[in-house]
Image (cartoon, grey):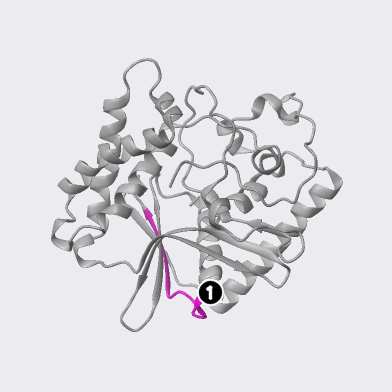
């Protein structure tokens, strides 16, 4: 899924990843034809635009490559283990089994995207990184008992088309359904629980998914649950109809702002705290850089590359 966690401390930037490939959402979603579907938006891309319109442009319009980071790759690997953990019989969903699944998940990711090996640099680094993955997984078992859970869906692709012909789409980490039909939407974060500055952004992502699930299934999720594996905390939120209608209005407003930026070519930077972790400072006018010329205009529907799911 992609707005994932509170940003870590800055670290040396490795070589950039290759040119972007289609994201997982693009590969399975309804095509944007410019007539029946005018555009597509995920919570990650909506979050990009709210953070900085120029960042949205670099990622979605220019499709500029960005370096892989050890934190992002850790998140991908840990998500894969937590997804596959529930393929095992309930009694076998133990911390030991989860640790044993880490290396195969890393090796599969490496086979699919060999360039992720760059996160470890020319020196070692792999062993320490693997231990950090193990620590994150260990923490999961202090928050939930997977032997007592039977998720209805894992890594579920969801999409819904609004009346405005805007397609909302994305991947939900987990959906639990109670015997009475109550729906819980669960998202794993491998970073730490956010401070006030980031909390609203994380909740927006969950409300976005709750809106899509409501439109698809006709039932408002009873619980939104963010599982922060970086420091072992959970954030739970109970949405209601007013919440989700407000989220729909907000998404529509974001989309209108994106279309205005497309038509005007005005993608303004929004300097702030998150600039310290941006891969594009060198070409950002807020830091004395010059963005590349805008490419030939296309519908703003494509998502930037993502690590394989």
Residue at x 25%, y 54% (from the top left corner): 85
The number of numbered discs placed on residues in the rendered structure image is: 1
46 sits left or right of 67 in the view = right
On screen, residue 202 above or below 246:
above
Is residue 224 among what the camera can see? yes
Q: Indicate the position of residue 273 as horizontal and vertical percent values.
A: 59, 37
Q: Is residue 9 left or right of residue 166?
A: left
As drawn, the residue found furthest toward the right would be 264
- Pick the front one: 110 or 145: 110
> In what element is the residue under mark 1?
helix
Q: Is residue 304 above or below residue 211?
A: above
Q: Nearer the viewer, residue 265 or 199?
A: 265
Residue bearing mark 1: 216
* Residue positioned most to the top: 122
Magenta stretch: includes residue 42: no
Segment tinted magenta in the rendering: 216-227
Q: Is residue 145 visible?
A: no
Choose top left, top right, bottom left or bottom right for residue 156: bottom left
Tell me the residue at 25%/33% (across/down): 131
Q: Quadrant of residue 297?
A: top right
> Mark 1: few, some, or many residues within 10 Å (few <14, many ≥20)?
some
Q: Residue furthest left?
A: 91
Percent across and percent down for residue 296 are 80, 39
- On the image, the x and y values in percent for residue 232 come to 31, 50
Relative to 153, residue 14 above or below: above
Residue 92 in the figure: left or right of residue 305: left
Residue at 53%, 65% (x, y): give it.
207
Q: Picture coordinates of residue 209 (x, y %)?
A: 52, 64
């Amino acid at each position: 899924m992609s707005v994932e966690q509170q940003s870590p401390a800055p670290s040396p930037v490795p070589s950039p990843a290759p040119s972007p490939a289609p994201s997982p959402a693009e590969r399975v979603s309804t095509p944007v034809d410019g007539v029946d579907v005018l555009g597509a938006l995920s919570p990650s891309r909506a979050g990009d635009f709210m953070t900085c319109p120029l960042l949205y442009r670099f990622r979605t319009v220019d499709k500029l490559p960005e370096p892989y980071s050890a934190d992002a790759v850790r998140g991908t690997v840990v998500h894969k283990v937590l997804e596959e953990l529930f393929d095992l019989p309930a009694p076998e969903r133990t911390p030991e089994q989860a640790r044993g699944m880490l290396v195969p998940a890393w090796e599969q990711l490496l086979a699919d995207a060999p360039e992720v090996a760059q996160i470890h640099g020319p020196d070692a680094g792999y062993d320490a990184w693997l231990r950090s993955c193990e620590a994150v997984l260990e923490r999961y078992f202090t928050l939930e008992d997977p032997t007592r859970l039977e998720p209805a869906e894992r890594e579920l692709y969801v999409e819904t088309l609004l009346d405005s012909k805007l397609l909302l789409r994305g991947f939900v980490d987990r959906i639990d359904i109670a015997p009475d039909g109550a729906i819980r939407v669960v998202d794993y974060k491998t970073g730490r629980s956010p401070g006030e500055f980031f909390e609203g952004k994380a909740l927006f992502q969950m409300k976005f998914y709750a809106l899509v699930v409501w439109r698809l299934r006709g039932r408002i999720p009873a619980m939104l649950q963010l599982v922060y594996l970086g420091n072992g905390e959970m954030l739970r939120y109970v949405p209601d109809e007013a919440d989700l209608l407000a989220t729909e209005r907000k998404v529509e407003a974001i989309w209108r702002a994106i279309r205005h930026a497309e038509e005007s070519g005005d993608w303004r930077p929004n300097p702030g705290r998150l600039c310290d972790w941006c891969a594009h400072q060198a070409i950002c006018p807020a830091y004395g850089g010059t963005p590349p010329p805008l490419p030939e205009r296309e519908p703003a529907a494509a998502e930037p590359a993502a690590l394989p799911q």
